[in-house]
Amino acid sequence: MTPETPHPRHPVIEVLMVFLRLGCTSFGGPVAHLGYFHQEFVARRAWLAETAYADLLALCQFLPGPASSQLGMAIGLHRAGPLGMCAAWLGFTLPSALLMAGFAIALPWLGAGAGGGCLHGLKLVAVAVVAQAVWGMARSLCPDRARASLAAASCVLVLSWPGPLGQVVALILGGLVGLRLASGEADQPPAATQQLRRAWLFLLAFCVLLVGLPLTWPEASAFYRAGALVFGGGHLVLPLLRDVMVGPGLVSSDVFLAGYGAAQAMPGPLFTFASFLGTALPASSLGVALLQGLVATVAIFLPSFLLIPGVLPIWRRVRGYRRAQNAVRGVNAATVGLLLAALYAQVWVGTIVDDVDFSVALVAFVALTTWRAPPWAVVILGAVAGALVS
């Protein structure tokens, strides 16, 4: 008798396990997450083509909320349907959420933090990861002089006009320039009417909760609004949450800043700062505190759960037409410029401060691109190198 061949892993379980590993090892913030996702799902697993990945990334740049988490949800939805979207979010978010909730509980008994050298090493790995993503996407999405020039112009625009508005303008201008790019592809069939009807229902629920939660559940509404109205990534959620948490005296300014500082050292999404705040709110027992943390975490990500399935079918319908395909080419090239600007302004500056830093980042880049080392192994080695250098 021949031994039985192992059954393939169920797609939802596969998505959960991959994103759980990413949730434990994806240090460096939202920009670095895009590099980790590109390495895992485009280069290594080939779940998405380069252009499909860029399309989803461009869409998530337009939406409010955490772009990297939304991109992960969209990849999970593409791979395994609605349950895959939930599995992607759970796997990527759970490690950081648990760590942040645990930090909120332990904060009264903790002294000064340590591990600055290790954290610096993780930031150096983030430089290599993002550089690898920029390099790979540029080769595929900017193959000619026109699109390479468009990427460079978008990078200059975003560096000259920092903030989410500059990013949106760069993407819009990229789409307008893309309309001039030649294309011989025919129009594709639009999305099914049933898919569009479901999409509008999701968008309606998004709007109803945005208006109705302040009237029925003010505590959850504060976190829902943060996830629904913040453009430009996790760092911009800071002033909005500070107003609703510190202003009324729900948490002290010191506790708020301690949690925000800890979030920088965590893998996974920065929006799990909500897990810390919810758990740190006044509570009658540990169980109530953990429940508050769970509500805050779900509430801040709930807008993304409604926006991704609500906008994706409409996006696919629009981009199925030839002129829209040309515009998408321009948007994809502009997205490379945005990622290049983020590599410089958000990752390189403040991280590479001397020759040793550059050397560690260069070794990590070569390990990822030439030796095809797994990102989690490079993350561990980067943390060790940072601690040793420190």
Image (spheres, rainbow, N blue to C red):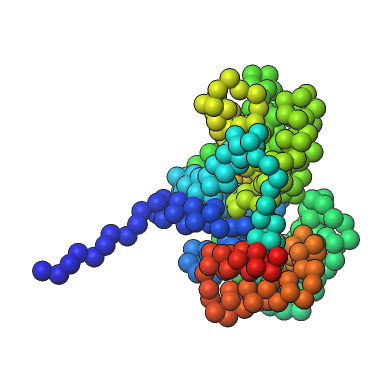
The x and y percentages for residue 194 are 50, 42
Q: Nearer the viewer, residue 47 or 117?
A: 117
Q: Residue at x 72, y 29 (%)?
A: 251
Q: Residue at x 60, y 66 (%)?
A: 384
Q: Residue furthest right?
A: 160
- Name the side, left or right, on which 10 lies relative to 17: left
Q: Image quadrant of residue 112?
A: top right
Extreme residue toward the left, this view: 1
In this rendering, the answer to whether 215 lies above or below 262 is: above
Q: Compared to 169, does 38 lie above or below?
A: below
In the picture, residue 150 is in which quadrant? bottom right
Name the residue: 73% across, 71% down: 357
Q: How many marks?
A: 0
Is residue 281 among what the camera can see? yes
- 245, 261: nearer the viewer: 261
Question: Residue 67, how many percent across, how many down?
Answer: 66, 51
Is residue 224 in view? no
Quadrant of the image occupied by residue 255: top right
Image quadrant for the C terminus? bottom right
Measured as percent of width and height from the top left, residue 89 is found at 53, 46
Front position in the image: 40 or 83: 40
Residue at position x 69%, y 26% from top? 211
Q: Tell me the quarter of the image containing the N terminus.
A: bottom left
Residue 85 position (above or below residue 283): below
41 or 28, nearer to the observer: 28
Q: Position of residue 230 (x, y in %)?
A: 74, 41
